[in-house]
Amino acid sequence: MNRDRFDGSVERYRSRMTSASAVTSTHTQPVVVGTIAYYLGKKSDEYHSHKWTVYVRGANGEDLSHCVAAVEFTLHPSFEESTRRLTKAPFEVTETGWGEFDIGVKMEFVDGGAATTTTPLKLFPTREEIAKYGPQTTKKPLIKERYEEIVFHECDAAFARRMKAQGGKRAPKSEHDDAWSTFTDRRELVSIYAAREVTAERIKVLEQQLEVLESIDANA
């Protein structure tokens, strides 16, 4: 389900990233990757119209340090030190600017694995958003984020215990806590992933059937 709202709001997508681990069980850690931007109003100038933050956070405000060792953000090359690596929460980078671009995000996990993705920096609302929620102001942040699930396969017992013990620990406070919302639509999320699994299995069957047909054609 996609949501795109302007008034302290969220645009969300569902996807999955995977990290391989060591020996026994599978664990899933929900995270949110995105950006939040505030219009600077009278404080803005030609090159600094917005203050924005790119982040990786727990989907429900939980601390990720039990599974995420570091997060590396790759900004536009025009920024000084365009690669920023953070080794403790909150995993956030804040800057000012005027242009939109894609930000590279690399999550390094405590099990030695890693996952990479990108997230778009959105500074300006669309015409439709302005018509629905009003013009951009210094009080209303523009949030663009998506839900991810990090799936750790074949985890060893120590990692599994740490995931279970620290999964409910709250993350360090962020200045954006009041603007962020939590993901509570779990039932819908399960349905989405179930549909994806069915689709993936169907694609696999069709690919096998295609291979058989191609083999028949080759031998004809």
Image (cartoon, helix red, strand yellow):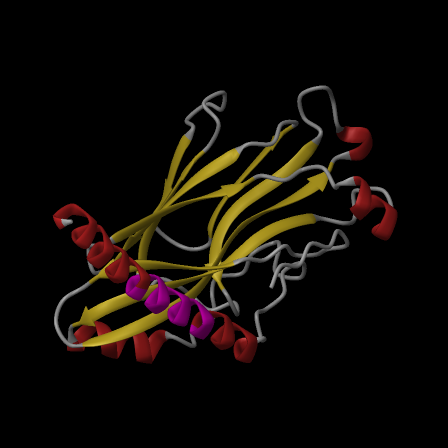
Q: Which residues are magenta?
A: 194-205
Q: Where's residue 28, x and y in %?
A: 35, 71
30 displayed left or right of 140: left
Q: Tell me the residue at 18%/75% (across/down).
A: 158
Q: Name the foreground residue: 121 vs 194.
A: 194
**Compared with residue 124, is residue 180 higher up or lower down, i.e. above or below?**
below
Answer with the quarter of the image where residue 105 lies: top left
Q: Is residue 174 magenta?
A: no
Q: Tell me the residue at 16%/46% (across/down).
A: 218
Q: Where's residue 110, x and y in %?
A: 24, 59
52 displayed left or right of 18: right
Q: Is residue 203 magenta?
A: yes
Task: From the image, give the main secondary structure of the stretch colored magenta.
Answer: helix
Residue most extreme to the front: 220
Image quarter (top left, top right, bottom left or bottom right) of the N terminus: bottom right
164 displayed left or right of 130: left
Answer with the quarter of the image where residue 82 lies: top left
Q: Where's residue 151, x and y in %?
A: 32, 66
Q: Where's residue 52, x and y in %?
A: 61, 40
